[in-house]
Image (tube, coloured by chain):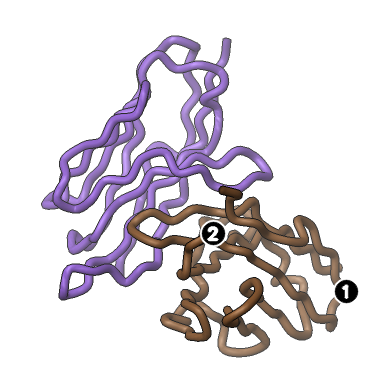
Amino acid sequence: KQEVTQIPAALSVPEGENLVLNCSFTDSAIYNLQWFRQDPGKGLTSLLLIQSSQREQTSGRLNASLDKSSGRSTLYIAASQPGDSATYLCAVTRYRAGGTSYGKLTFGQGTILTVHP
Amino acid sequence: NAGVMQNPRHLVRRRGQEARLRCSPMKGHSHVYWYRQLPEEGLKFMVYLQKENIIDESGMPKERFSAEFPKEGPSILRIQQVVRGDSAAYFCASSVGRKQYFGPGTRLTVT
């Protein structure tokens, strides 16, 4: 059974700092990994998707890396801003023989990020 | 292209009533997923549907919960005889490829 763990559970940083959020998963047979952002009382916004054959993806100030063999992913946020304050979720889909996935996402518990001015 | 739509956004039901949650996927998306987020817990998969078919319902409680995605119209998650423990945020996602796109969720409160 796939388990996804995110560390730290909460993080508070001053504006401008670079930071790293960690995600680990127990079953390396993943199809892809997604990082999401969730604002309080809102839905999920997809930030980055890394396919199992990729090592990293970048979008603006965000960079996500994937080390499938060790079961780890990191989300790097450069020059953090108060608007980055949210819960960040990591989720994986499981690989299915034939080059497809089982579809469903398995989520970590999330990291609550607070960026203070 | 409108995003994933869910309604209602907030739903209050008394114990024993039925709750119906609706999800309209993004245009062109034929795969729908339902997830539940209980208070102080992470998001958990419930069910995966394609048009007129349930592909994976391994996360659905055995009783009182059902889901459908008819040929026409939205996907429906139905909870019969709701109990206080059903109070949660229910999210729908749709996909046509690798990425899942989430709706804003329906927050169900059972009184």
Q: Secondary structure at mark 1?
A: loop
Q: Quadrant of the C terminus of chain A?
A: top right
Q: Which mark is residue B14?
A: 1
Q: CA distance from mark 2 to mark 1?
A: 34 Å
Q: Quadrant of residue B100?
A: bottom left
The chain holding disc 2 is B
At horizontal 63% and vertical 63% (from top left) the residue drawn is B90
Q: Horizontal and vertical percent for residue A101?
A: 28, 68
Badge 2: residue crowd in 10 Å (few <14, some 14–19, many ≥20)? few
Q: Horizontal and vertical percent for residue B45?
A: 48, 68
Going from N to C along the chain, the mark reached first, 2 or 1, is 1
- Give the chain coloured purple: A
Q: Quadrant of the N terminus of chain A?
A: bottom left
Q: Which mark is residue B83?
A: none
Q: Circle 2 is placed at which residue position?
A: B27
Q: Amino acid at mark 1?
A: Arg
Q: Quadrant of residue A96?
A: bottom left
At horizontal 84% and vertical 81% (from top left) the residue drawn is B17
